[in-house]
């Protein structure tokens, strides 16, 4: 079983829809949670970064972390065709030992927003 | 502010050869991590360097190695290339190891 599970999709939605992306994880040592967006032929771009449980909002994006359920989500409001990309969740533990500089990623969800 | 720069963008090699990839981190970032991305395995952690020292290593064979220079620039080397080494190799930098990591656009390595 992978440490981080993410539904690969693909997910296709109409422009303006609310998109919900999710990851579950098994390692209770994870403390930092991130969402990245990756366009074709580009590297992952950091969208959201949160520590421990709670919500964080940035424009059209909202990240939620529920450590008790080992579940994280990313919501995209008013989705646009330019949001079409692969979305990756990533996690890490506190600095030290086998956590130094290591992000553990989900498989990524391919999202298409059609006009 | 310049982002993470990786060179070259594309490489074609044959089995048995070796290759060196380069990464220049964001100015002020001292931690550099390397990842391999493939369609089947996704993004997998290779290793992390901080102040010229490897602090962490993923589950890859010894053919994969790296180093970091005093200006935080990093290189990774793969020796005795195998067909399965074909992948996108990504470098990421951060101020310290567990702050948000920012990625370059990667080096696409193809093995013939």
Image (spheres, rainbow, N blue to C red):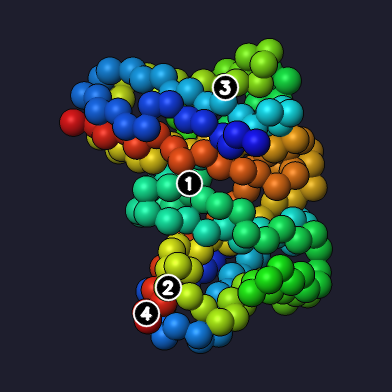
Q: In this view, does B56 lie to the left or right of B67?
A: right
Say if B52 sits above or below B103 in the image: above
Q: Where is residue B17 in the image (x, y as percent from the top left)?
A: 28, 18
SS assignment at label 3: strand
Q: Position of residue A53 (x, y in %)?
A: 81, 69
User: In whole angstroms, how far apart are the C-alphas of marks 1 and 2?
Assistant: 19 Å
SS assignment at label 2: helix
User: In whole angstroms, how far apart are the C-alphas of marks 3 and 2?
Assistant: 36 Å
Residue behind mark 3: B74
Say if B5 sits above or below B42 in the image: above
Tags 4 and 1 on a common chain: yes
Viewer-side label of 4, 1 = 4
- On residue A81, which mark appears? 2
Viewer-side label of 4, 3 = 4
SS assignment at label 4: strand
- On residue A43, which mark appears? 1
**Mark 3 crowd level (few <14, some 14–19, many ≥20, 10 Å Cα):** many
**Mark 2 crowd level (few <14, some 14–19, many ≥20, 10 Å Cα):** some
């Amino acid at each position: 079983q992978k440490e981080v599970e993410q539904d690969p999709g693909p997910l296709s939605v109409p422009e303006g829809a609310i998109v919900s992306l999710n990851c579950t994880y098994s390692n209770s040592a994870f403390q930092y949670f991130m969402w990245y967006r990756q366009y074709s032929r580009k590297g992952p771009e950091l969208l959201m970064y949160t520590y421990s449980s709670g919500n964080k909002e940035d424009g059209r994006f909202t990240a939620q972390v529920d450590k008790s359920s080992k579940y994280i989500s990313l919501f995209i409001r008013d989705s646009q065709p330019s949001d079409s990309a692969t979305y990756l969740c990533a996690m890490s533990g506190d600095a030290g030992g086998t956590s130094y500089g290591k992000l553990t990623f989900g498989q990524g969800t391919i999202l298409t927003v059609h006009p | 502010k310049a982002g993470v720069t990786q060179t070259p963008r594309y490489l074609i090699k044959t089995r048995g050869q070796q290759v060196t990839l380069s990464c220049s981190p964001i100015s002020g970032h001292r931690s550099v991590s390397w990842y391999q991305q493939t369609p089947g395995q996704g993004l997998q952690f290779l290793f992390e360097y901080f102040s010229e020292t490897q602090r962490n290593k993923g589950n890859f064979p010894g053919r994969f190695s790296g180093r970091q220079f005093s200006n935080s620039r990093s290189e990774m080397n793969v020796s005795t290339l195998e067909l399965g080494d074909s992948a996108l190799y990504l470098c990421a930098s951060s101020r310290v190891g567990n702050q948000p990591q920012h990625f370059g656009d990667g080096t696409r390595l193809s093995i013939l």
